[in-house]
Image (cartoon, rainbow, N blue to C red):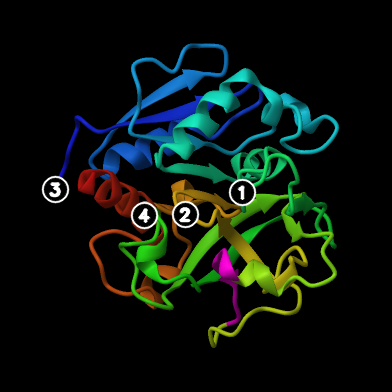
């Protein structure tokens, strides 16, 4: 089922490099995508926004730190406050964290994405959905506790918090890195970066803003998958990672 009247803005910052793949994944899920430069007007209004992967502003200062202060982010924050879905993938997740949009306090950000404990990592990893599927706009197409195999490619993807007590993070956790049995990954390489609570993705409290380090747009077609992973996956018409975009379609069609 498609609804090409539903428009998703893929926001392109200087240094983004995953915008085309992300746009194709959005369109494969039955929505219209528009790649919008950071210095263009986000006009007319869009139904959802995605910040794709890359190296915005060459990761100067910290990954995502400069882009988080771009004027376009004020518009995206206002749209998120209205309930519009916003997804940050890899560098996009770093931007959302730097902007304080996850878990949701621009005045006092509680989460950051720090350098990986073992440096840059490009590999396929396992994720387990730990949120109730209906809790976020990007997970409603998943089964409870579903395990997804998906690629990562980052050097600064370790979720950290300055809080001595971090159990509150599990309230906004969306995906955790896990081992082959589905248990939270406590060691490398199943936990590829050393994230607290093995976090791979978190959301705001409302569930309409999600920041995830893995790349669903790089696992949205079976042809992108290495041997063995397709055979292990549930037999569906599209790969599990594409459910991120299918979930978005279902969420904005409910509005």
Rounded to the nearest angstrom, the CA distance separating label 4 from label 3 is: 14 Å
Task: Identify the residue position indicated by label 3 in the image.
Answer: 1
Is residue 79 located in the magenta-colored stretch of the structure?
no
User: In the picture, residue 195 is in which quadrant?
Assistant: bottom right
Instruction: Say whether disc 1 or disc 3 marks the residue closer to the N-terminus.
Output: 3
State the SS at label 2. loop
Name the residue nearer the viewer: 105 or 84: 105
The numbered disc on residue 104 is 1
The x, y position of residue 151, in whole percent, is 56, 57
Task: Identify the residue position indicated by label 4 in the image.
Answer: 242
Residue located 55% across and 53% down the image: 204
Q: Indicate which label's residue lies in the foreground, 4 or 3.
A: 3
The x, y position of residue 4, in whole percent, is 19, 32
State the SS at label 4. helix
Instruction: Say whether disc 4 or disc 1 marks the residue closer to the N-terminus.
Output: 1
Rounded to the nearest angstrom, the CA distance separating label 2 from label 3 is: 26 Å
Query: Pointer 3: residues within 10 angstroms few (<14), some, or many (20+)?
Result: few
Range shown magenta:
171-179
């Amino acid at each position: 089922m498609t609804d090409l009247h539903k428009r998703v803005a893929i926001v392109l910052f200087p240094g983004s490099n995953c915008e085309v793949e992300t746009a194709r994944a959005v369109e494969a899920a039955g929505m219209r995508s528009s790649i919008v430069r950071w210095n263009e007007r986000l006009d007319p209004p869009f139904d959802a926004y995605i910040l794709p992967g890359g190296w915005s502003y060459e990761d100067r200062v910290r990954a995502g730190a400069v882009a988080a202060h771009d004027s376009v982010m004020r518009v995206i924050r206002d749209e998120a406050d209205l309930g519009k879905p916003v997804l940050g993938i890899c560098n996009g997740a770093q931007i959302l964290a730097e902007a304080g949009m996850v878990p949701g306090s621009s005045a006092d950000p509680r989460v950051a994405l720090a350098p990986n404990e073992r440096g840059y990592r490009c590999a396929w990893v396992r994720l387990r959905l730990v949120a109730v599927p209906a809790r976020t706009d990007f997970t409603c197409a998943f089964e409870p506790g579903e395990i997804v195999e998906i690629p990562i490619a980052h050097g600064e993807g370790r979720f950290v918090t300055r809080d001595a007590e971090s159990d509150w993070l599990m309230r906004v956790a969306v995906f955790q890195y896990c081992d082959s049995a589905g248990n939270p990954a406590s060691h490398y390489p199943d936990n590829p970066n050393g994230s607290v609570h093995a976090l791979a993705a978190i959301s705001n409290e409302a569930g309409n803003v999600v920041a995830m380090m893995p790349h669903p747009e790089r696992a949205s077609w079976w042809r992108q998958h290495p041997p063995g992973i397709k055979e292990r996956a549930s037999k569906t018409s599209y790969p599990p990672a594409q459910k991120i975009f299918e979930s978005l379609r279902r969420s904005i069609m409910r509005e």
